[in-house]
Image: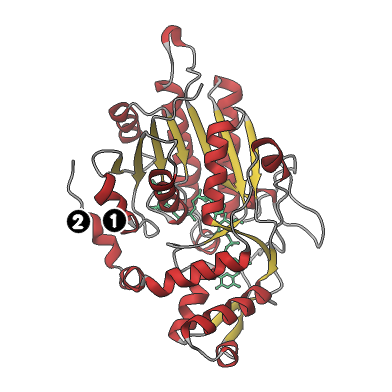
Amino acid sequence: MRKLTNVLVTGGAGFIGCNFIRVLLKKTPGFTGRVINLDALTYAGNASSLADIDGEFGGKRYFFERADITDRERVRGIFQKYDIDTVIHFAAESHVDRSILGPEAFIRTNVMGTFTLLDAARDLWRGEGGSMREDVLFHHVSTDEVYGSLGETGYFTETTPYDPRSPYSASKASSDHLVFAYHHTYGLPVTLSNCSNNYGPYHFPEKLIPLMILNMLEGKPLPVYGDGKYVRDWLFVEDHNTAVWAIVNRGKSGEKYNIGGENEWENITLLRKLIGIVAEKAGLDAGKVAETITFVKDRPGHDRRYAIDCSKLKRELGWTQSVTFEEGLSLTVDWYLSNKAWVVNVKSGEYAHWVEKNYTAR
Ligand code: NAD
Ligand code: DAU
């Protein structure tokens, strides 16, 4: 029986991690444990995204530790300080374009960082007699990009061979292999999920959907890579997180689960849909906004199509999505329109100073 009492969330100040912590503490009545958010606060980490959570739960059920997952001593110290029994590992360098410009940080965080966490868990999760405890779990959050690129038909299943093609996806594939190696070699209880493209609140505006929303609102060009006919499968971030929580609670140790939106869109078609929603909500002329679409140089090695078969997750764990794409996009646009302070904070770079200004060590 898994304990799920002291849950270490890595990368909890990032896009998906902060949504995860919010749902866990505010909308998951069955969970009464503590959440320890371990985050290095890179450019993608924004502790102010959890200001409300820190105010309500800080020092009681929510604890923030600014630390790097590659720092062996800090990681071990945090495991021991909070008696960690569950790891939900979101922390990563996550942006494909950045991995093309500078792969090293991806190898360091995604490969070495995952290794450092796994090794701490292997060492510190031994029970009496030296055998691995059974009430612990290491859940690794990964991506559908490890499977490579699809043609016009077909889906990634859990048995699709790995074929990563960018430094980002290669680093995530390496981390996936390490996770299963620790399970098979040392008996570490693990689960793993490979998810498709997320969207929703608190998304850093370097990624397609938030970048396009904010550029539309600011009257800036909308840069579409290549011919715009690349296909992604979009999932609302809260639905990714309910899937992760279902796997952490009921997933079988040693198993991987695909998570997807069953919601494929060509980038250009998605963009036109988004223009309609933003224009209506923000009182803009959709035709004029569409004129700012700009086809730009393609991403090197750009994967053509991702599409996920998530039937295992649905069948075995009973997970379903809570919103349609239209509802999710509408919620997302509403969120960006009504959280202008968050946007200003990110765009000005002020968010990087939130911890030193607001956080009182407890
Ligand atoms: P993100 O870039 O928004 O956040 C990453 C977080 O990790 C940040 O808070 C950052 O400060 C932290 N971090 C980075 N390096 C660190 C280090 N060395 N030590 C400690 N913390 C560090 O990423 P995201 O979009 O929230 O993605 C979270 C996870 O989900 C990643 O593992 C990613 O590969 C995976 N994933 C993302 C998507 C997506 O669409 N965004 C889809 C599938 C899987
Ligand atoms: O599939 C899951 C992955 O989805 C995650 O593992 C990654 O962490 C996450 O960043 C995301 O990767 P993508 O590369 O698919 O996301 P991005 O938002 O960068 O791009 C989505 C698509 O839009 C892709 O085909 C590239 C294109 N694009 C992107 C940007 C930023 C553009 O055409 N213009 C842009 O300005």
Q: Nearer the viewer, residue 178 or 142?
A: 142
Q: Which mark is residue 358?
A: 2
Kindly identify the residue that appears in the image at 63 percent across and 80 percent down: 272
Q: Secondary structure at mark 2?
A: helix
Image quarter where the C terminus lies is top left
Q: Position of residue 337 (x, y in %)?
A: 42, 75
Compared with residue 119, is residue 161 higher up or lower down, i.e. above or below? below
Q: Position of residue 30 (x, y in %)?
A: 45, 36
Residue position marked by numbered label 1 in the rendering = 51
Q: Earlier in the sequence, mark 1 or mark 2?
A: 1
Dot 2 crowding, Cα within 10 Å, few <14, some 14–19, many 20+: few
The type of colouring in the image is secondary structure
Q: Which-is-in-front pick, marks 1 and 2?
A: 1
Kindly identify the residue that appears in the image at 39 percent across and 40 percent down: 70
Does the CB distance between marks 1 and 2 fall below 8 Å? yes
Q: Nearer the viewer, residue 200 or 228?
A: 200
- Asked where in the image residue 117 lies, by quadrant, the reply is top left
Q: Is residue 11 visible?
A: no
Dot 1 crowding, Cα within 10 Å, few <14, some 14–19, many 20+: some
| Kind of residue sitting beneath label 2 | Asn
Q: Nearer the viewer, residue 199 or 31?
A: 31
Q: Which mark is residue 229?
A: none
Disc 1/disc 2 C-alpha distance (Å): 9 Å
Q: Position of residue 218 (x, y in %)?
A: 43, 84
Q: Secondary structure at mark 1?
A: helix
Q: Is residue 52 visible?
A: yes
Q: Is residue 155 left or right of residue 180?
A: right
Q: Is residue 88 left or right of residue 50?
A: right
| Kind of residue sitting beneath label 1 | Ala
